[in-house]
Amino acid sequence: QVPFTVLQGEGVEYLGHANDAVIAISNYRLHIKFKDSVINVPLRMMESVECRDMFQLHIVCKDSKVIRYLCHFSTFKQCQEWLKRLTRAIARPAKPEDLFAFAYHAWCLGVCVDEEDQHAHLCRPGDHVKYRFEMELVRMGFDLQNVWRVSDINNNYKLCSSYPQKLLVPVWITDKELENVASFRSWKRIPVVVYRHVRNGAVIARCSQPEISWWGWRNADDEYLVTSIAKACALNPGVKVSGSVPHTGSGDSREPCDADFDSSLTACSRVENSGTPQKLLILDARSYTAAVANRAKGGGCECEEYYPNCEVVFMGMANIHSIRNSFQYLRAVCSQVPDPSNWLSALESTKWLQHLSVMLKAAVLVSSAVDREGRPVLVHCSDGWDRTPQIVALAKILLDPYYRTMEGFQVLVESDWLDFGHKFGDRCGHQEKVEDQNEQCPVFLQWLDAVHQLLKQFPCLFEFNEAFLVKLVQHTYSCLYGTFLGNSPCEREMHNIYKRTCSVWSLLRAGNKNFHNLLYMPGSEQVLHPVCHVRALHVWTAVYLPASSPHPLGQDDMDIYPPPGSQSQEFSGRCLDRLPKTRSMDDLLSACDSSSPLTRTSSDPNLNNHCQEVRVGLEARHTTTEGAELYLGEG
Amino acid sequence: EIHIKEPIEKEVNPHLLPGELLLCEASTVYKYIQEDGSNRGSYGKLVCTNFKIAFLDDSASDDNELQFKNKIVGENDITLQCVDQIYGVYDEKKKLLTGQLRKYPEKLIIYCKDLRVFNFCLRYTKEEEVKRIVSGILHHSQTPKLLKRLFLFSYASAAPNNTDGRNQTVMFDTLEDWRDELERTKGNVKYKAVTTNEGYKVSEKLPSYFVVPICVSEESILNLPIYITWSMFFVQIWCWSCHNGAALLKMSAFPKEQDDIASQTQKAFLDGIYKTISKPPYELLKMDDLSSSLPSLQDIQTAYTRFKQLFLIDNSTDFWATDVKWFSLLESTNWLEIIRRVLKKAIEVAECLERQQTNVLLIEESATDLCCVISSLVQVMMDSYSRTKSGFQSLIQKEWVIGGHGFLDRCNHLHKSDKEEAPVFLLLLNCVWQLVQQYPPAFEFTETYLTVLSDSLYVPIFSTFFFNSQHQKDTSTSGESLKTQSGPFRFLTVWDWSVQFDPKAQAFLNNPFYAEKPKPDKSQRKTARFKHQRQLSLPLTQAKSPMKRGFFREETDHLIKNILGKRIGKFINSSDELPNSFREFYDSWHSKPVDYHGLLLPRIDGPEIKVWAQRYLRWIPEAQLHGGGTIATAAKILDLMEEVQSLQEKMDEECSQAV
């Protein structure tokens, strides 16, 4: 009777028939099954539902899809009834436990006898994530004896609730001084180090804006800390200081397009002098005017005179309100799509790609300051939890091939986004009780879009494929996994979310072949120099326009592509609907396949859930490998 | 013998092709790497030959090996036909240079048709050298030229082409080629190849051999008065037959002013044909007057001129300034919109052929411009053979080269008249590129192939794109041969890719992801091509056709009346019922999985029509991706393919050993 296989912990709450379809609402999704197509959307993915023209359900999704469903209900009343049910279902939860992730996890545990083992498999994304802080310290080669130290001042989040518990600062900065600095920075988000370039020792640090206010306050400890970061870099220089051989870009000599002028530029502009500290670059993500305007609210920006050996640069990135508007325009434009008349100018007017371009430019600025000039960089915006992680995390991807692997990317998201308090709950609109639309903004989605642009530009340098990013977008909003619940690490710990929900990395784990980029060249040390002008940027069709999205190479083709020498199959392939085969109702695999909101749109049938793998384990793996081989064997 | 070796050791000499003559040169010319104010660049010699303008870098080192290199046209070579516009800079002011000059510029900017931009500084060059080189370049690249002066002829006489040149491409210059094509498409049931025009007895426009409805007798063509047959495609010329028997035909439109006798004769002639066709079982024929349903050549030329301007960027300030309003600039050129309209038209035609099983007759004034675009596109979409490299090349031969597209005039190779210029062939390549990027596995060739093909339009060592018609080629070939007494010229064809690229570079032209059709047996090449059955699963609205069959007579009458009355324009337009059936056809096809060997319809919604970045952005330094982009990807893919192949070989070896 229920037209889909329910997930663990999922219960159908309403089930009804319209003339041409079966419609169902569970505690996780809305499902409408037509004769030959399906609409399948997680409830939390929906931003709003309304009824238009009497009989049309108009659903706006947080990932920019707009679903128009003309229901052929017999009466208007019936349609209203469904609308009411749906509106109730997508209202913000009263408490975190109402989110489906908790039920899902609990039931997954329930069905398994070997509870401990199952829990480990479901929750734990792996040791590389669990011990990320320690492992990153080692990987990036911080000298924790003489130059840097890990401060425990934020143990139990007692200094700053939106920061991680362990903070990395120069060794000579005392906790007392840190406390002083905290009083001067918005939300006590003090400058701490998050990345070190192994080759030249330059670091990236992040913080929130200084609270200068109209009075022009200063804080000696803050000035001391900021300049100390540059000094510390000089004391802990890179491992290959000699610098006679340019490292940049030429790390892998097989790179065909790797022009020599790049590396020569690097060689001449880099000053390899470990004695004097390089001038620290303070990158303020805002425009100068926005930064000054913030003084009215008690914020502001660093004054170059008070911070010796520092340079302040403003990037002019728009705030969340502009980005939200831009996104809403983009959604509106994309939902009009079959009408092509003015697509280009409409796209331009959304400014989405222009915003992306600025973000990429900021990241390139950071990465070239670090890599080419060996300069330490301090990045901040106003609060340091939206634009700052965008820039920092992107720059880290440009600089360090580790973050382009699946494991590294998980570490990156966990540390730069989750640990440093990007407010996923507010931004994605699944925080309990809050109804403030003004806090919502697809900041993380925008960043994933930027990563997608990089992936498009460097198709051989990422271990994961586009499907990986698309899935991540979906599960940022679906609330099937607990990873992106809550606003800060403190909050997630308070609600014990790590223990009571599953991690999205269990789906997007490195072992999942569906998300592997077949063109990946491991071992390339190349620093990415992307082009960031609007001409080179693409609309992310797989997310914003999935209905018309072409199948990206190397992903879907292997599924719809008939094996060689099977003409009969080819024929039947035509008759099949675009429904991926994982969707057939009696298929166990689909039990966990929850994530694609729209069938026609879910261009990636690469779904593969951990549950399935627990049960059918090897079998699933076998099929995918086969697919990959087949794909390659074609030409 | 042409140039004497200078005693100076550092002297760099131009690499000259057979038949190439050094005309003038200038030394200590400074070439900017990038016009960004940084003045980075290098000194060298600027030379002009009867083939190209070349910059010979003094400091050039040979170790700078490019992965993808053209053997004929180097990095700093501009063939004379590739020069688009030349500007001179006088006191920081840019001025278009044409013809005679009174004052010589201090800087020379050369915009190329393949969208490269060269900046040469002449400030350090001797005055008389400047005069000589600038007027030489202007004279040889910008002033009208005789056909005989094309480098093509000097090259062909200096380097006789001894290669067979046939390779896999069907040239369509023999009767057999046409017969084979008829057989391949099963068009031979209703159409036949005729030899009436051998020696161009009937028309100079028509190829020596062509295909007409079986009912047209050769005598009836020969009996037509010369003023009808001489200058146009007066009869329906067959292009291609669909698996269901529906055919794609083309014909010239009737000139507006035609005296009564002429129209009467032609009416009688066409009437005769229609009478024969219209015997039961009736055939449906839909006419499409492309000059009324598609943008004019003028519009296309204007749009392209504006479009290409977006990529001929002088400096990086311009680049960033335009970047902000990039999309609206792009939209205002209208070029992408033209591509969309052309693709849409091709889908409409495909719908008629495939679903309505109706013959389609394309009509255009000359039947050699948009007719070629649409008929080629339809075949690329419907015939998977046209998506192989040799199939595509044969298609270009059939529809364009033999089909009589006026390459010489449309590319303005001889600088005879700007009015005739229109990027019709480029339009086709742009449309095909859209399909290639939407369905990469369906094509045996890559976008790089299309890009180098578009570049080859300006390389005058191949005859392919340097004649207006087959007749012109044949006459100029044989005429010259009397003098040289070396027999007719044997020109190179562009399809011999080894002339331009070594095998390693040629690998980039082939798509490693091509979904090659499984061939049951290699020896049965022809039978392997029957893609038709598979397409039957398409929604065929057969219910519709019988109902319409009765209309044919009427439609024909109507048609002749209209043809001979006014222009055909309004009547033919499919406007009444097409939009709906078109949308239905389009949507239903897109809701099904793609069969890479079957019918292929491009997506034409706004976001799907893109800029061919490889062709248009490749020279802009700001747009270059170090270590990324398509070439790096292609290289990686080729590596992978090699690895797979070697593994396969190893496996086979082990297998055979085990046995």
Image: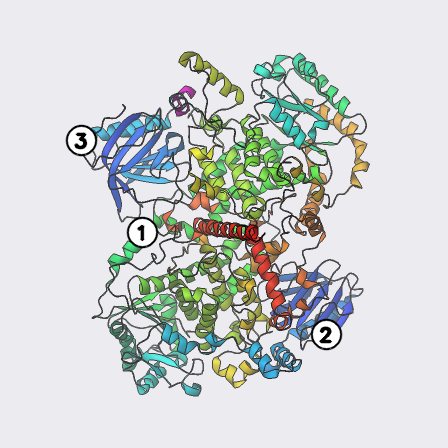
- Say what amino acid the circle numbered 2 marks: Val
* Cα distance between the residues tagged 3 and 1: 32 Å
Circle on res. A260: 1
Q: Is mark 1 on a helix, strand or loop?
A: helix
**Predominant SS of the magenta segment:** helix
Q: x%, y% of residue A617?
A: 61, 70
Residue tagged by mark 3?
B7
Q: Can residue B103 be seen in this view?
A: no
Q: Is mark 2 on a helix, strand or loop?
A: strand
Residue tagged by mark 2?
A12
To which chain does the residue with label 1 belong?
A
* Cα distance between the residues tagged 1 and 2: 61 Å
Q: x%, y% of residue B109?
A: 32, 37
Which residue: 58% across, 40% down? B387
The magenta-colored residue range is B146-155
Q: Nearer the viewer, mark 3 or mark 2?
A: 3
- Say what amino acid the circle numbered 1 marks: Asp
> How are the colours assigned in the image?
rainbow
